[in-house]
């Protein structure tokens, strides 16, 4: 029961993270020690599941898929997503800088915690960590391209986006922005919910199939690399987390803004920041990082941000001790 409560809590943290643009649920999974088990559980989804269900029934299938773990995690994620919709949305609107600071401290402390868990760090691991940081930094700095509703492109974009979703440090929604598909998918989904059409259904179905294919294939790739190259893979993923700090620096000035309704990209005007930043119809595409003294779209809340960073660091310490206690009780 303690294990299920622990898993549900971690799922809730993942759900909250997914409600925050630029923060990956995969990061939280790696921080809380369930990443390997999650990848292994996803990997078990294949055609043999249907055969097992037909021959041995629900119980055997549930056990093979690590159903207890996935159920607790999924329920926790749903609670987290609901919390994110209300609580996190409020914080993003009124206290964005302290919120980003909290996650900055959380991820920074997690990087050092995970590095500490890698036994015998060598040159190879150091190089891969640096490479991962460079890749993630580069990805989070890319400006979006013009998207397309070509079904082949939509399918492969879904594969890439969902693969990024389970990579620590890289947000799947941000990948969709880079590919220029964020507006296409969101607009199509809104249109389908208000006035369903066959074309919208086809596009969303193709995108979903791409996501499912990417999730199944990429989980196998990650599982194989962890099995044969655990330390280098963990170092690379930690590098992704380091590089993602570029996206969650607390004091950022918008440069380019996406108008979701019009599908157009405009230059940010500082005098209009209240109308733009608090409006769901707009999404920030590119930003520049500044120091608190150069922050021009509100008060920097420096003292509160420092406290939030410390709370983020302490959260990692508490979670690691709690995880060790749970593992010890099972020995």
Image: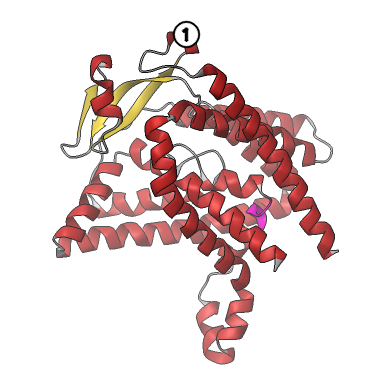
Residue that extends furthest to the bottom in the rendered view of this protein: 55
Identify which residue, 68 or 61, lies in the foreground: 68
Q: Which residue is drawn at 60% across and 56% down?
A: 9
Rendered location of residue 97, percent (x, y)? 47, 26
Q: Main secondary structure of the magenta part?
A: helix
Nearer to me, 291 or 183: 291
Q: Where is residue 323 in the image (x, y as percent from the top left)?
A: 74, 52
Q: Is residue 122 left or right of residue 301?
A: right
Compare residues 292 and 143 and report the one nearer the observer: 292
Would you place residue 8 above or below residue 287 in this image? below
* Residue bearing the label numbered 1: 293
Task: Say whether residue 263 is left or right of residue 59.
Answer: left
Q: Residue at x 54, y 28 (%)?
A: 101
Is the residue marked by circle 1 packed among few (<14), some (14-19), or many (20+) residues within 10 Å? few
- Give, as a single range, the part of the protein colored magenta: 33-37
The percent position of residue 132, horizontal first and vertical second, equals 60, 33
Element at label 1: helix
- The reply to whether residue 134 is in sight is yes
Residue at the image point whose x is 16% and y is 59% from the top: 194
Q: In which quarter of the image is the N terminus?
A: bottom right
> Looking at this rendering, what residue extends furthest in the top direction?
293
Whether residue 291 is visible to the viewer of this picture, yes or no, is no
Q: How many labels does the image show?
A: 1
Q: Does the magenta stretch include residue 36?
A: yes
**Quarter-of-image position of residue 66:** bottom right
Q: Which residue is drawn at 50% across and 81% down?
A: 50
Residue 59 among magenta residues: no
The C terminus - image quarter: bottom right
């Amino acid at each position: 029961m303690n294990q299920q409560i622990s898993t549900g809590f971690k799922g809730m943290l993942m759900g909250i993270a997914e409600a925050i643009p630029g923060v990956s649920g995969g990061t939280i999974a790696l921080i809380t020690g369930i990443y390997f088990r999650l990848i292994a559980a996803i990997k078990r989804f294949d055609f043999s599941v249907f055969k097992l269900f037909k021959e041995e029934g629900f119980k055997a299938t549930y056990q093979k898929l690590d159903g207890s773990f996935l159920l607790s995690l999924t329920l926790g994620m749903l609670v987290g997503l609901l919390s994110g919709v209300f609580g996190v949305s409020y914080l993003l609107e009124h206290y964005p800088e302290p919120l980003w600071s909290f996650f900055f401290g959380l991820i920074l402390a997690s990087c050092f915690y995970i590095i500490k868990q890698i036994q015998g760090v060598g040159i190879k691991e150091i190089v891969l960590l640096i490479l991962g940081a460079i890749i993630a930094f580069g990805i989070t700095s890319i400006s979006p391209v013009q998207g397309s509703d070509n079904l082949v492109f939509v399918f492969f974009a879904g594969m890439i986006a969902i693969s990024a979703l389970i990579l620590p440090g890289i947000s799947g929604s941000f990948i969709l922005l880079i590919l220029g598909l964020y507006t296409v998918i969101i607009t199509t989904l809104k249109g389908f919910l208000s006035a369903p059409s066959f074309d919208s259904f086809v596009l969303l179905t193709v995108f979903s199939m791409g996501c499912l294919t990417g999730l199944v294939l990429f989980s196998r790739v990650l599982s194989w690399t962890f099995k044969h190259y655990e330390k280098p893979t963990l170092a690379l993923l930690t590098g992704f987390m380091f590089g993602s700090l570029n996206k969650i620096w607390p004091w950022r000035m918008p440069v380019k803004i996406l108008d979701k309704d019009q599908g157009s990209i405009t230059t940010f005007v500082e005098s209009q920041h209240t109308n733009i930043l608090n409006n769901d119809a707009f999404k920030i595409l590119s930003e520049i990082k500044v120091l608190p003294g150069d922050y021009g779209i509100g008060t920097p809340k420096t003292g509160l941000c420092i406290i939030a960073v410390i709370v983020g660091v302490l959260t990692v310490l508490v979670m690691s001790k709690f995880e060790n206690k749970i593992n010890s009780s099972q020995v």
